[in-house]
C-alpha cells in the first residue's frame, strides 16, 4: 500500500519555526522553512541534517513551498538554500516573493548589525536565494515535474498567504500554512474547493478558541485606544511590519477620520513604506471593498498615519505608535516599551499571539517585573491589553475548512500540544476521520488507497452500459466484462476479442454437456421428435428448432438423442451449451430454464408411458 | 462672453403638470402579399446545403408571423425537418416550432402529435433536448388539456433515461411544469389508474433524479420539484431527507437549489418531528431545517451563502433557542442534550416526547438559562489572554441538536467577506427580529456594530433595519454612542437615514437625549444642508421623551435662576433646533413652560408661525388663548378626524340625492358642497386627499351639468356658435380633470376608476354632440362616432365587474341601446346620445379606504435665494434639485423635471432611476442634477423648474 509520510521539523506540537517534510508518491517536499523567534542559537533553525543525514538537500528534496512571508515560515530559507545548500525550485506567491526579501534583510540587520552575530546569512545570500524562487498564481496548477503538481489557494492571513495542494497521481496533501476564515478590514477569507485530499495539514494556533464577532473585537479595540488617548496616555501597539499592522492601520485611520481625532498615529519607519507600497501594488489580493474602491482611493494611502522617528517617543501628549516586532522581543517596540512602561496612563495593546519566552508572553501572563539584559529589572506599570487580532483561524474556522475540503485524514501542526489534543478529539468526534499531531522529528504515516486509472475503449463502455439497467444509479459499482491488459506501465480495459487479437491467441470454446438417461421404447429420431414436440408445448416464447441433422436447438442449447448398445429402451439425452450461455446476462435465465427442461422432459416421458 | 445675467430659479410648491401622451390607435392592415408559409417553403427548397437553410431560418425567425399562417408554417417546417440531415438545422427548426407555438391567438394542440412523433426517430441529443423544450412551450400553452399533458408527461418519462444531460434536464423541467397538480396520485392508486406509467407519482420520478450523476440534472430535478410546489402541489415530506443530503453536494447550484427546497419543506411541515442521526433525539422539522440552512451560511460559495442568509429570514416559526444560537458561534448548552436523557420516555409517543423535552427546558429559571447561555463550555472566546487553555473534555455522550457548524450563522453572515451576504444577513435579521421582540433585543448589538461596516450600502441597510425594529427596543447609552458616531458620515443618505432612525428610537436616560442633541447640533454645524432633517428628528425626539427632556430644559435654554441671560439669536439653526426639541417635549409636559424665559415665549410665537409643521400648539400660561381652536383640535385628535370623516360622508350623501342635473337648486348644492370639501381638506390633513378627490369629482359633475343646461340646446343649430365655446371648454376641462383624478391619487379601487371613466365618457359624448352641431363634414363625424363607440366598448370590457354598480347611469343606458347605436346613422346616434346624456343621473361616488393626492415639494433650489446663478451662454451649469414626492406610484418612470426658460423654451429631463430614494413608505425623494444652458440674454430673469407627472391615457386600464 502506498503511504504518505509527514514529518514536522518545526511546528510539530509547537508554534514558530514551521518546517514540514512530506513524502508523497516518491516525492519529497518541504513545506515552509521558518525560524523560531524565541531562540537566538541553533535551535532557531530547523534541523536540516535530519533530512538527508549527509547527502545534499537538492538530491533529496523535489521542491520547497513557502506559504507566506512571516519569518516563522520563511526565516530559514537563505540559511537552507545558501548555507546548507539547496538548488531546487522554491515556490511562493508573487506578493510573498516581493515582501519576503525585505523581511529577511530586516531580520538579518537586527541579528548581525545590532546583536553582532557572525555565521549568519548575508544580503547576497538572500538575493541568491530569491533567484531560485518560482512565483505562483492563485488557482494555477504548476507542474514541478511530470508527476508532482502544486496549486495555490487564497488563505487570508497576510497579503499573499496561500494554502497549497500537492498532488502526485491521485494522492494529494493540502498544507494550509497560516490561514484565516474570517475576512478582515483588508483581506478576504480563506477558500478551498472540495478537493478531498488524503491529508489536510492545518495550523492550529487557536485550537481551543472560538472567537466572538470580529466587529465586537474591532469596537473594543477602538474604544480602548480612544479612552487611552482621551486620558492623555500613549498607546503602543507592537506589530509585525506586515499583516495585522495594515489591518489595524486601516481601522484606526477610518476611525480617526470619522471621529475627527487629532492625536498623531505613528508607524515605525523603514519597512513600512516599502511594505505599504506592496500592499498598494497587490490590490487583487485584498478584500472586496479595497479591490472595488481603489480606483477612487487606495485604502493603503494613509492620511493620519505618519512615519515614526525615535525622538518622538519622548514627545509629550497622547499618541499611538505601531512598532515592530510584534512579540516585544527586540527592536523598536521593545525600546519604546521600556520608555513607556513606567507610566500607568500608557497602554500596550498586544494584537496577536506571543511565543513563549518573549517579553510579550511574559507581560501578558501578568508578570510585573521584567529582567532585562544586564541584570536590570523593569517595573511594568502601564496597562497591558490583549486583543486577539491575530489572523489565524479559530477552532470554528478549522472545522469550517475541514468541511470545505473534506479530507480523509487530518494533521495538526503549528499549535500547542495540549490544545491540539483537545481539537483532535473534537475533529475525530465530529468528522470521524483520523487526526494526527506528530511532534518535531516524529513521522506520521497515512496509507492511501489510490485509485488506479484504466483506459477503456468507448465502444466497450457503451456496450456494457447498454446491458445494465436504466441510468441513474451512479453511486453503485457495476460489474462489466472485459480484459485487463497491463503493458508498459499502462492499464487498458478492452473487450476479450480485441485482447485475443492483440495478444495473438486463439479463442477456446468451452462447452458444458450433460447426459440424461431416459427409458423410451421408440426409435432415436422418434424420441427426439417427441422431445421436440413436448418442449415446444412447454416452453413458449423460446425458439425451438428441429434440425435435419438429428438435433434439437433450444435457443443455443443443443439436444441430441442416442441409444445405448445394451438396452434399446434406455435412451441417452445429450445436452450441450456453451460457456457464454452460462455467463451472459441475457440468458442468465437459462439456468432455471435448464432445470425446467430436465424436469419437464422427465415428466413428459413419464406421462407418455 | 460671460453673460452677467441674473437668473432666478423659481420655487414651486406642489405644482404638478400633466402631459397627456395620447397614443394613436394602431391601424390594422391586412396584407395581401403571398402567405409567409409559401415564401418560407420556396426559400427552404432553394437551400442547397445546410448552411443556407440555416441562414434562411435565421432570417425567417426575425420576422413576425401572423396567426393565420402559423399552422401552415409549422407544417412546412416539420416537412423539412424530416428531410434534413444536419443537426443544427433540425435544432433551429425545433426551436422555431416552440417560438411559433407561442404566437398569440394560436392554439398549438393541432401540432402536439407531430411534435411528439418527431421525437421518436431523433438521434441527436441536442435536437432532442430542443424538441422537448418545444413540447414544454406547447404544453404550457395548453393548460386546459389534461390529455395532452398526460401524453407529454409520458414522453418525458420515456426520455428521462437519456444519456445526455440536456435531455434529462428538459424532461425534468417538463415534469415540473406539467406534472399533475390537481390529482397527485398516491402510491396505492398507482396500479389500476395508470396503464403506461405516465400517471405515476411525479414527485417520486423527479426525486429519483436527485441523485443523478450530473449536477445540472440534479439542479433541474430540484427546480422541477420547486416548480411543482409553486403550482400548488403538496411536496411529500419524504423529500426532506433527500434535499438535506443535497445540501452537501459538490456543486454550488445544487446546494443553492437545495436550500430553497429545504426551506419549502420547512414551511410545509414545520411541526413534523425529525430524528437526529445517531441518537434518539427528535426535533421539529422547522428547527432542523433552520439549523441546516444556518450551516449553509458558512458555505464555500457566496451565492449559496446569500441564498441561505436570505432564506433564514423567512423562517419565522423557528424556536427561540435555535434563533438565539444564530448569534453565538459556540454551541449553547441549550442545544446540547445528554444522550441518556430521552431514553426514559422512549415509550411515549413522539409528540408527547417533544412536549416533555420542551417542558423540561422551560422549568429552568431564566437566570439559570442566561448563565448557561454565556458560559457555553468547551471553547474560550479568545478575548482574554491565556484564557484558552483546554478545558476538560466534555462528555462524548452528548448530542448536538444543531450541527456545530451552524452556530452563529448571523455572526458569520454579518462578517462575511462579500457585502451581498452581509446585506442579506441584515435583512434576515430584521425579518426575524420583527416577529420576535426578545430576539430583537439580542441582535441589537450586532446591528449597531454593522454601522461600522466598510461598505455604505450595508451601513445604510442596517440603519433602515434598526428603524424597522425600533418599536421593540430601547437603546442603551453605549449603543446610542455608536449610532450617533455615524452622524458624521459624509454620505447624505446615511445621515438622513440615521435622522429617520432617531425619530423612531426610544432612549433610556436623559444623558442619551443630551448626547443625541449634541451630536445632532454637531452634524448641523458640519452639514448645514441637513437643517430640515435635523429639526424634524428633534421634533420626534422631543415628543417621544418629554420626561427625559424636562430636567435638561434650564441647561438647554441656558436660563439661570437669578441672572438674565442674553437672548439667543433667533436665526441660528442650532438654537431653533433646541427650541424644536423643547417645545415638542412641552406639548405633553405641562410643567415645562414654567421654566421658559420671556424671550422663549416670543420665539415660540415666531416659530409657531414660521415653522408650524415643526412646532406644536402649546397651551401657555398667561398667554391669550388665541390657539383655542387648535388646542381643541389637538386634544381630541382622533375624534375630530372621525367627525370630519362623517361630515365628508354626509356631504356626499346629500349630493347623491340629486337625481338629474336640471334643477337650479342642485347646482347651488353642488357649489356649496365643493366649497365645504375644499375647506375640509385644508383643515384636516388626513382627509385632504379624499376631500380633494371628491371636490374635483363634483366639479366635473357641475361643469357637465352647466354645459347641458346652456340654452344652446334649444337654439337652432346655425345660431349658437358663440355659446358653443363655453360648452366645448367645459368638456375639455372635464376631460383634463378626469385625468387628474385618475393619475394623481393613490389608493383608488377599480370602482372609482370606473366612475372616473364614466365621467370622461360623458365628456366625450358631450364633445361628440358639439362636433355634430358644428357640422364640419360628415366624414369627420363618422370617424368620431366610431371612435366613441369603440370607447364605449372598451369601457365595457375594462369594467365588466363594475357594471352592476353603474345601474341607471349613462353607460348603462348606452349599453342597452348599443345594438341600435352600432347600426344607426351618425345623426341619429348623436340624437340618442343627447337624450341619454340629459336623462342620466348623477353617479354616486363611493370613497375608498385610503386616498391620497400625489404631491411634490421642491426643497432645493429655494426661490428666495439671493445669489443668482450665473453661467456662460452656450455652456452648461448644473443645478441641484432636491424634492420630496409623496404618494407616488413608480416615480422612476413617471416623474420628469421640466426647465422653463424665460423665452418660453422648455426642456424635459428624465432623472436616472438611481436618483430616487425611498426614505419611507409612500415617500420618495428625488435628488438629481439638471443642466441648464441657454444663449445670452440681457438682464437677470427667472428660470422655472417644475416637476411633471407623466401619464398616458391609454395605460389607464390598470
Image (tube, rainbow, N blue to C red):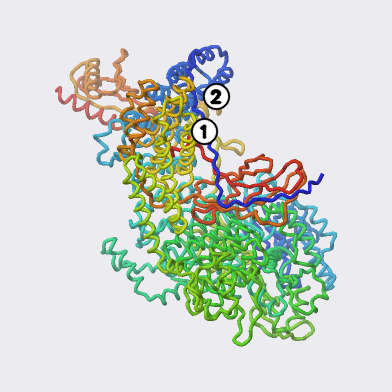
Find residue B796 and report its horizontal and vertical position in percent. Answer: 36, 33
- Badge 2 marks a residue whose secondary structure is helix
Q: Chain of mark 1?
A: B
Q: Is residue A476 visible?
A: no
Instruction: Report the disc number at residue B232.
Output: none
Question: In x, y percent, where is residue B729?
Answer: 49, 36
Q: Residue at x 69, y 45 (%)?
A: B931
Q: Quadrant of the N terminus of chain B?
A: top right
Residue drawn at x 78%, y 49% as measured from the top left? B4
Taking the image as shown, residue B790 lies to the left or right of residue A410, namely left
Q: Can residue A158 be seen in this snapshot?
A: yes
Vertical placement of residue A236 versus A547, above or below: below
Q: Badge 2, how many Cα within 10 Å: few under 14, some, many 20+? A: few
Marker disc for residue B62:
2
Choose between A349 and A95: the one closer to the eye: A349
Q: Is residue A167 above or below residue B114?
A: below
Q: CB atoms at circles 1 and 2 under 8 Å apart?
A: no
Residue B22, labelled with which disc?
1
Dividing the picture into quadrants, the one containing residue A58 is: bottom right
Q: Earlier in the sequence, mark 1 or mark 2?
A: 1
- Quarter where residue A372 is shown: bottom right
Amino acid at each position: 500500500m502506498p503511504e504518505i509520510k509527514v514529518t514536522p521539523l518545526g511546528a510539530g506540537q509547537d508554534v514558530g519555526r514551521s518546517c514540514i517534510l512530506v513524502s508523497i508518491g516518491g516525492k519529497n517536499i518541504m513545506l515552509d522553512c521558518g525560524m523560531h523567534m524565541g531562540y537566538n542559537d541553533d535551535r532557531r533553525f530547523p534541523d536540516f541534517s535530519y533530512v538527508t543525514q549527509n547527502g545534499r538537500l537538492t538530491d533529496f528534496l523535489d521542491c520547497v513551498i513557502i506559504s507566506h512571508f512571516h519569518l516563522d515560515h520563511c526565516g530559514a530559507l537563505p540559511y537552507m538554500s545558501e548555507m546548507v545548500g539547496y538548488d531546487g525550485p522554491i515556490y511562493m506567491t508573487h506578493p510573498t516573493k516581493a515582501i519576503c526579501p525585505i523581511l529577511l534583510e530586516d531580520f538579518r540587520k537586527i541579528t548581525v548589525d545590532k546583536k553582532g552575530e557572525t555565521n549568519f546569512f548575508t544580503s547576497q545570500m538572500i538575493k541568491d536565494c530569491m533567484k531560485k524562487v518560482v512565483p505562483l498564481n492563485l488557482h494555477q496548477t504548476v507542474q514541478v515535474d511530470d508527476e508532482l503538481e502544486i496549486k495555490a489557494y487564497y488563505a487570508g492571513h497576510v497579503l499573499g498567504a496561500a494554502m497549497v495542494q500537492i498532488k502526485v497521481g491521485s494522492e494529494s496533501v493540502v498544507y494550509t500554512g497560516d490561514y484565516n476564515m474570517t475576512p478582515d478590514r483588508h483581506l478576504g477569507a480563506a477558500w478551498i474547493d472540495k478537493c478531498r485530499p488524503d491529508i489536510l495539514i492545518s495550523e492550529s494556533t487557536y485550537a481551543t478558541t472560538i472567537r466572538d464577532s470580529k466587529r465586537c473585537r474591532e469596537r473594543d479595540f477602538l474604544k480602548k485606544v480612544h479612552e487611552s488617548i482621551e486620558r492623555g496616555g500613549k498607546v503602543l501597539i507592537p506589530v509585525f511590519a506586515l499583516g495585522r499592522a495594515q489591518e489595524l492601520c486601516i481601522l484606526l485611520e477610518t476611525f480617526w477620520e470619522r471621529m475627527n481625532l487629532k492625536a498623531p498615529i505613528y508607524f515605525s519607519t523603514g519597512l513600512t513604506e516599502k511594505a505599504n507600497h506592496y500592499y498598494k501594488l497587490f490590490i487583487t489580493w485584498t478584500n472586496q471593498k479595497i479591490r472595488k474602491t481603489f480606483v477612487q482611493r487606495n485604502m493603503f494611502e494613509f492620511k493620519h498615519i505618519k512615519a515614526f522617528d525615535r525622538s518622538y517617543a519622548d514627545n509629550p501628549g497622547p499618541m499611538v505608535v505601531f512598532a515592530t516586532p510584534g512579540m516585544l522581543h527586540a527592536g523598536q517596540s521593545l525600546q519604546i516599551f521600556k520608555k513607556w512602561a513606567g507610566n500607568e496612563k500608557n497602554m500596550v495593546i498586544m494584537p496577536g499571539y506571543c511565543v513563549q519566552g518573549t517579553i510579550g508572553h511574559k507581560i501578558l501572563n501578568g508578570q510585573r517585573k521584567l529582567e532585562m539584559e544586564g541584570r536590570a529589572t523593569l517595573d511594568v506599570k502601564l496597562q497591558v491589553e490583549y486583543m486577539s487580532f491575530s489572523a489565524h483561524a479559530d477552532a470554528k474556522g478549522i472545522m469550517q475548512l475541514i468541511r470545505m475540503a473534506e479530507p480523509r485524514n487530518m494533521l495538526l501542526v503549528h499549535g500547542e500540544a495540549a490544545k491540539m489534543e483537545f481539537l483532535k478529539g473534537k475533529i475525530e468526534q465530529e468528522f470521524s476521520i483520523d487526526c494526527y499531531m506528530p511532534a518535531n522529528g516524529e513521522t506520521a504515516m497515512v496509507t492511501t488507497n489510490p485509485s488506479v486509472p484504466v483506459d477503456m475503449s468507448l465502444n466497450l463502455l457503451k456496450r456494457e452500459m447498454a446491458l445494465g439497467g436504466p441510468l441513474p444509479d451512479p453511486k453503485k459499482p457495476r460489474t462489466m466484462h472485459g480484459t485487463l491488459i497491463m503493458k508498459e506501465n499502462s492499464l487498458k480495459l478492452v473487450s476479450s476479442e480485441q485482447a485475443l487479437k492483440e495478444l495473438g491467441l486463439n479463442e477456446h470454446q468451452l462447452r458444458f454437456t450433460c447426459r440424461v438417461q431416459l427409458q423410451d421404447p421408440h426409435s432415436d429420431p422418434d424420441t427426439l421428435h417427441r422431445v421436440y414436440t413436448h418442449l415446444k408445448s412447454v416452453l413458449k416464447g423460446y425458439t425451438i428448432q428441429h434440425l435435419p441433422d438429428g438435433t434439437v436447438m433450444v435457443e443455443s442449447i443443443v439436444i441430441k438423442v442416442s441409444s445405448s448398445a445394451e438396452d434399446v429402451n434406455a435412451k441417452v439425452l445429450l445436452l450441450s451449451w456453451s460457456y457464454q450461455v452460462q455467463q451472459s446476462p441475457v440468458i442468465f435465465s437459462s439456468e432455471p430454464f435448464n432445470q425446467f427442461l430436465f424436469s419437464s422432459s422427465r415428466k413428459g416421458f413419464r406421462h407418455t408411458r | 462672453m460671460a453673460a452677467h445675467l441674473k437668473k432666478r430659479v423659481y420655487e414651486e410648491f406642489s405644482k404638478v403638470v400633466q402631459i397627456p401622451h395620447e397614443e394613436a390607435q394602431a391601424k390594422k392592415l391586412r396584407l395581401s402579399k403571398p402567405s409567409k408559409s409559401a415564401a418560407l417553403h420556396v426559400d427552404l427548397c432553394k437551400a442547397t446545403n445546410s448552411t443556407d437553410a440555416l441562414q434562411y431560418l435565421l432570417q425567417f425567425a426575425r420576422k413576425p408571423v401572423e396567426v393565420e399562417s402559423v399552422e401552415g408554417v409549422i407544417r412546412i417546417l416539420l416537412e423539412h425537418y424530416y428531410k434534413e440531415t444536419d443537426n443544427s438545422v433540425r435544432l433551429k427548426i425545433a426551436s422555431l416550432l416552440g417560438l411559433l407555438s407561442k404566437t398569440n391567438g394560436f392554439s398549438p394542440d393541432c401540432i402536439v402529435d407531430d411534435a411528439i412523433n418527431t421525437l421518436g426517430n431523433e438521434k441527436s441529443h441536442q435536437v432532442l433536448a430542443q424538441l422537448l423544450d418545444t413540447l414544454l412551450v406547447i404544453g404550457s400553452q395548453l393548460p386546459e388539456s389534461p390529455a395532452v399533458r398526460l401524453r407529454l408527461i409520458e414522453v418525458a418519462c420515456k426520455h428521462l433515461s437519456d444519456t445526455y444531460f440536456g435531455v434529462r434536464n428538459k424532461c425534468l423541467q417538463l415534469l415540473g411544469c406539467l406534472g399533475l397538480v390537481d390529482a397527485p396520485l398516491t402510491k396505492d392508486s398507482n396500479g389500476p389508474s395508470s396503464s403506461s406509467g405516465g400517471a405515476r407519482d411525479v414527485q417520486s420520478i423527479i426525486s429519483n433524479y436527485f441523485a443523478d450523476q450530473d449536477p445540472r440534472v440534479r439542479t433541474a430535478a430540484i427546480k422541477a420539484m420547486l416548480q411543482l410546489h409553486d403550482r400548488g402541489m403538496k411536496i411529500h415530506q419524504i423529500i426532506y431527507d433527500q434535499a438535506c443530503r443535497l445540501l452537501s453536494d459538490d456543486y454550488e447550484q445544487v446546494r443553492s437549489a437545495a436550500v430553497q427546497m429545504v426551506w419549502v419543506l420547512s414551511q410545509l411541515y414545520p411541526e413534523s418531528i425529525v430524528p437526529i442521526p445517531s441518537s434518539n433525539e427528535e426535533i421539529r422539522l422547522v428547527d432542523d431545517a433552520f439549523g441546516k440552512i444556518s450551516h449553509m451560511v458558512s458555505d464555500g460559495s457566496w451565492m449559496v451563502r446569500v441564498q441561505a442568509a436570505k432564506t433564514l429570514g423567512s423562517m419565522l416559526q423557528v424556536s427561540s433557542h435555535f434563533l438565539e444560537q444564530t448569534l453565538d458561534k459556540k454551541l449553547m448548552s441549550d442545544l446540547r442534550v445528554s444522550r441518556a436523557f430521552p431514553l426514559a420516555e422512549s415509550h411515549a409517543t413522539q409528540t408527547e416526547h417533544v412536549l416533555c423535552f420542551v417542558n423540561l427546558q422551560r422549568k429552568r429559571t431564566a437566570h439559570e438559562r442566561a448563565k448557561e447561555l454565556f458560559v457555553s463550555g468547551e471553547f474560550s472566546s479568545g478575548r482574554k489572554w491565556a484564557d484558552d487553555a483546554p478545558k476538560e473534555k466534555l462528555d462524548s455522550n452528548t448530542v448536538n441538536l444543531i450541527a456545530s457548524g451552524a452556530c452563529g450563522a448571523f455572526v458569520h453572515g454579518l462578517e462575511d467577506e462579500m457585502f451581498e451576504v452581509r446585506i442579506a444577513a441584515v435583512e434576515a435579521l430584521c425579518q426575524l427580529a420583527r416577529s420576535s421582540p426578545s430576539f430583537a433585543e439580542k441582535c441589537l448589538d450586532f446591528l449597531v456594530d454593522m454601522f461600522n461596516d466598510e461598505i455604505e450600502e450595508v451601513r445604510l441597510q442596517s440603519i433602515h433595519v434598526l428603524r424597522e425594529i425600533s418599536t421593540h427596543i430601547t437603546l442603551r447609552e453605549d449603543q446610542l454612542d455608536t449610532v450617533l458616531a455615524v452622524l458624521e458620515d459624509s454620505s447624505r443618505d446615511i445621515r438622513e437615514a440615521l435622522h429617520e432612525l432617531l425619530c423612531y428610537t426610544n432612549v433610556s436616560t436623559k444623558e442619551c437625549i443630551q448626547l443625541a442633541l449634541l451630536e445632532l447640533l454637531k452634524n448641523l454645524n458640519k452639514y448645514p444642508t441637513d437643517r430640515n432633517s435635523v429639526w424634524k428628528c428633534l421634533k420626534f425626539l422631543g415628543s417621544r421623551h418629554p420626561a427625559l427632556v424636562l430636567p435638561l430644559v434650564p441647561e438647554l435654554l441656558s436660563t439661570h435662576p437669578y441672572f438674565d441671560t442674553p437672548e439667543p439669536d433667533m436665526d441660528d439653526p442650532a438654537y431653533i433646533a433646541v427650541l424644536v426639541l423643547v417645545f415638542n417635549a412641552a406639548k405633553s409636559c405641562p410643567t415645562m413652560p414654567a421654566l421658559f424665559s420671556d424671550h422663549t415665549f416670543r420665539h415660540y410665537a415666531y416659530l409657531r408661525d414660521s415653522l408650524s409643521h415643526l412646532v406644536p400648539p402649546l397651551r401657555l400660561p398667561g398667554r391669550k388663548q388665541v390657539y383655542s381652536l387648535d388646542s381643541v383640535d389637538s386634544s381630541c385628535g382622533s375624534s375630530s378626524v372621525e367627525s370630519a370623516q362623517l361630515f365628508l360622508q354626509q356631504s356626499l350623501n346629500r349630493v347623491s340625492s340629486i337625481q338629474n342635473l336640471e334643477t337650479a337648486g342642485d347646482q347651488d348644492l353642488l357649489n356649496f358642497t365643493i366649497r365645504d370639501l375644499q375647506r375640509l381638506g385644508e383643515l384636516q390633513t388626513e382627509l385632504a386627499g379624499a376631500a380633494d378627490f371628491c371636490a374635483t369629482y363634483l366639479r366635473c359633475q357641475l361643469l357637465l351639468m352647466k354645459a347641458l343646461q346652456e340654452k344652446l340646446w334649444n337654439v337652432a343649430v346655425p345660431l349658437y356658435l358663440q355659446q358653443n365655446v363655453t360648452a366645448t371648454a367645459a368638456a375639455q376641462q372635464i376631460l383634463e380633470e378626469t385625468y387628474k383624478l385618475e393619475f394623481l391619487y393613490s389608493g383608488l379601487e377599480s370602482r372609482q376608476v370606473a366612475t372616473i371613466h364614466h365621467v370622461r365618457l360623458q365628456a366625450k359624448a358631450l364633445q361628440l354632440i358639439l362636433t355634430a352641431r358644428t357640422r364640419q363634414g360628415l366624414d369627420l363625424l363618422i370617424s368620431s362616432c366610431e371612435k366613441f363607440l369603440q370607447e364605449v366598448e372598451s369601457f365595457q370590457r375594462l369594467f365588466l365587474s363594475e357594471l352592476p354598480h353603474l345601474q341607471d347611469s349613462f353607460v348603462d343606458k348606452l349599453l342597452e341601446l348599443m345594438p341600435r347605436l352600432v347600426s344607426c346613422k351618425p345623426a341619429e346616434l348623436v340624437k340618442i346620445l343627447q337624450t341619454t346624456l340629459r336623462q342620466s343621473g348623477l353617479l354616486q361616488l363611493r370613497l375608498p379606504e385610503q386616498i391620497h393626492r400625489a404631491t411634490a415639494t421642491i426643497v432645493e433650489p429655494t426661490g428666495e435665494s439671493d445669489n443668482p446663478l450665473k453661467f456662460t451662454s452656450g455652456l452648461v451649469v448644473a443645478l441641484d434639485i432636491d424634492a420630496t414626492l409623496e404618494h407616488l406610484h413608480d416615480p422612476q418612470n413617471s416623474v420628469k423635471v421640466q426647465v422653463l426658460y424665460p423665452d418660453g423654451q422648455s426642456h424635459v429631463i428624465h432623472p436616472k432611476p438611481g436618483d430616487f430614494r425611498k426614505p419611507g413608505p409612500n415617500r420618495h425623494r428625488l435628488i438629481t442634477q439638471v443642466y441648464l444652458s441657454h444663449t445670452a440674454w440681457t438682464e437677470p430673469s427667472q428660470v422655472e423648474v417644475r416637476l411633471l407627472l407623466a401619464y398616458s391615457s391609454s395605460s389607464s386600464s390598470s
